[in-house]
Image (cartoon, helix red, strand yellow):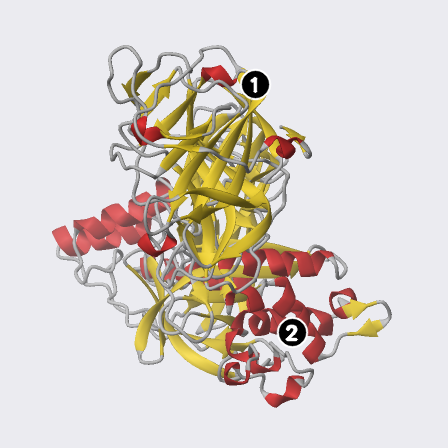
Amino acid sequence: MKMFKYAVLLIIAISLVTNGFAQTTKPLPKVQALDQFNPIKIGPTGNSFRLSTGDTCITNLGQEPQYFIFPWVVGDELYKAFQDPSQTCDSPYPYTIEAVQFFLYYVDTLPGTVQLAVDIEEALDPGGCPSPGEMLAISPLYEFPMEQNLYLITIPLDTPIVINSPFFTGLYVGPNGTPEMSAVITDSFPAPCASYNDWGEGYVDLDTVHNDQTGEKIFIGRLLLYAVGTTGGSGGTQPAPDAIFVNPDDFQLVGNQVDLWANDAAGSDIIDQASFQYRGDGNWIDIGTDDNDDPPLRDGVTPSGSGNGLATTWFTTGLAEDNYDMKVIITDSLGRIDSTIIPVHVDPTPPFPNLITPILGQNVCGGITVEVSCPDEDIVFVTFDMKSANADYQIPFHIFDQFLGGDVDNDPLDGNPASGGEFGDFCSGPAAAASVIKYWFNQGYNYIMLEGSNVLTDEQLIDRLFLAMNIKEHFGAYDGEFVEGLRQYIITHGSEMELRTERNPTLNDLYSWTGNEEYTIMVGVSGDPGQWMTLAGWLPPSGTTHTFRFINPITAAVEEMEVKDEAGELWVWQNSEWRIIDIIVGMIPYNWTVSKTAIGVDAYGGDGWGTFWSASGLNEDSIYFFSTTVNDQTNNAFTTGTMVRYDCLFDLKPGDIDDNGSIDPADMVYLINFLYLRGPAPPLGVVAGDINCDGVVDIADVLFIYRHLFSGGPAPVSCQ
């Protein structure tokens, strides 16, 4: 887009107002109803201006585009519209005007260009018949490329202006390009002294303009030309959008369903929407648009709901496996736009394993069947591993009090309370992340807390995260800014750590990420209050009850909380209520190696992917992780796992192979499937299949049950 910085001198403030019946020297126009109501939102790109932090208010009186007037626009002319913020804004004054917004319809089917600039004038006689007065502020002149469509255009002023009374917004249409192909837009509510036009003969009240031949009124509504600004005159700032991807990462392999997640790194409060697109070798193709930028604010003080921010889901089924570009375009309410592009590798049938058996918390004994499914049609082999775990597990984190962060008065040890104008109350996010960072520092990853040759103090560490996550700007941590702030901190402190995020996590994710893959995890919790915590371990599972240890930055203590999967969500019992864990963020060094014991390999897969392990050497009543890794032809490999208990001293009813409470023919079928058809192991462990107590599970055990059921043979007895 071309910008003419000095062409705004063409905007002339001198006006002559014509009242009464007006005839026009303009082309004979037609008033036509619009047949589309979904405008393309555009604005000058690359023009970084800022919006006050007060309440955003647009002076549009609920006006909708109804009619376009064509032909009418000739170029090198001015349009003005009366604005009264008191009709649309709460506590309207002082009102800081940042930009002017208007609708324009480009009629020609051939592309063209239109030069546009905006301005603000005082209103003469605002209590009577107001008319444009002295110019107060202007913008540069921009050249917009146009195609046939309805546009909603937002142009910022050179310098915001604070007013305390009604005013006029102005639009200048330049002489160059194809302005005659443009049509001004009105609503359907005519009003005198509300809309003016000067095409070189002085200002004309458009409510008085009639067709020279028919005498019919031309403008049967008001110009849709209004101001965008904030009330309160705070003088604060809002940045232009800065689009980034939170998920996926650059060059990441993505499957048939991808969680797309974007963020405005600038931290603006006036983001309007994010549009997601992809391309292979051709044009950009739309994936979806999210206009609900309403992520939960986890501030540690007030309740927060669940939400995803700027996000959508991409279904890649039908695409060829290949490299693709992904783009997100973020637009704010002033029409400012920013975009970013990342490369990804799409595999609609990826090597993402799904563990069928065992399942979380399953009791095993005497042997273990590990079975996995996977959509990838190019699997080369699958490996199976085992790792012992502590039933009572606590990670040695350093506990950070959130009130160590948010310092303003250069005394970080005074508690930094919000009541004193500081931000300690809102720092659960920086505190949760600081515990994880210091843990890895203590594991020998020194760069994570080094700046030059100096090791950061606890106060400095939490302060760096406070700034990176924009806590001061939002009085808390939004999810996207938590993740991106932490990522930027890592990049500037050695770049040795990998971040992994999962929204809508499961109970198995908490166990597996922490115990099996050894990530350190931060959890985002909704409810009252919304906050961040650090997962610090777990207590021995008891039946279906799972209790985890969390570092709560609000209390600066390790707290034990029950966690459960229910209704497709992960819940934690905190503050005497069930609250949802919306998101987990894991951190681990890129070069970290997890020690596991290999228990099998399957390179055939013709009868399913799996292995049977005799489970020799496992300790009674102990916790273990079992995991599987799928490897495909393109050398991609992905792992999943779960936690089980090895216990042979359970209450087993001899002969009840399927654990349904009775001995019947179904037990024979279950055991035959296990022995010869790669069916699952008995729910209570392979030892449950040793019916004749000879130490081997084989066809003899099937025959033992058959004789008992149909030939008067003895009942199975316990082998213990």
Numbered label tally: 2
Report the residue at 25% width, 35% height from top. 189
How crowded is the residue under tag 2: few (<14 C-alpha within 10 Å), some, or many (20+)? many
Is 5 on the left or on the right of 152, as rendered?
Answer: right
Q: Please, is residue 123 above or below residue 17 in the view?
A: below
Residue 367 visible, this angle: no
For the residue pair 62 and 205, the one nearer the viewer reads as 205
Task: Give the percent coordinates (x, y) of residue 427.
Answer: 55, 74
Q: Quadrant of the N terminus?
A: top right
**How busy is the neighbourhood of tag 1: few (under 14 within 10 Å), some, or many (20 plus)?**
few
Q: Horizontal placement of 214 versus 321: left or right?
A: left
Q: Which amino acid lies under the numbered mark 2 shown in the image of this protein?
A: Ile
* SS for callout 2: helix
SS at circle 1: loop
Amino acid type, mark 1: Gly
Query: Residue beneath label 2, please?
Result: 462
Closer to the camera in the image, 223 or 418? 223
In which quadrant of the rendered view does residue 381 lie?
top right
Q: Tell which of 369 and 718 is nearer to you.
A: 369
Residue annotated with mark 1: 282
User: How far separated are the C-alphas under marks 2 and 1?
Assistant: 46 Å
Query: Which of the two residues, 692 or 303, is positioned nearer the viewer here?
Result: 303
Residue under the point 31% across and 43% down: 673
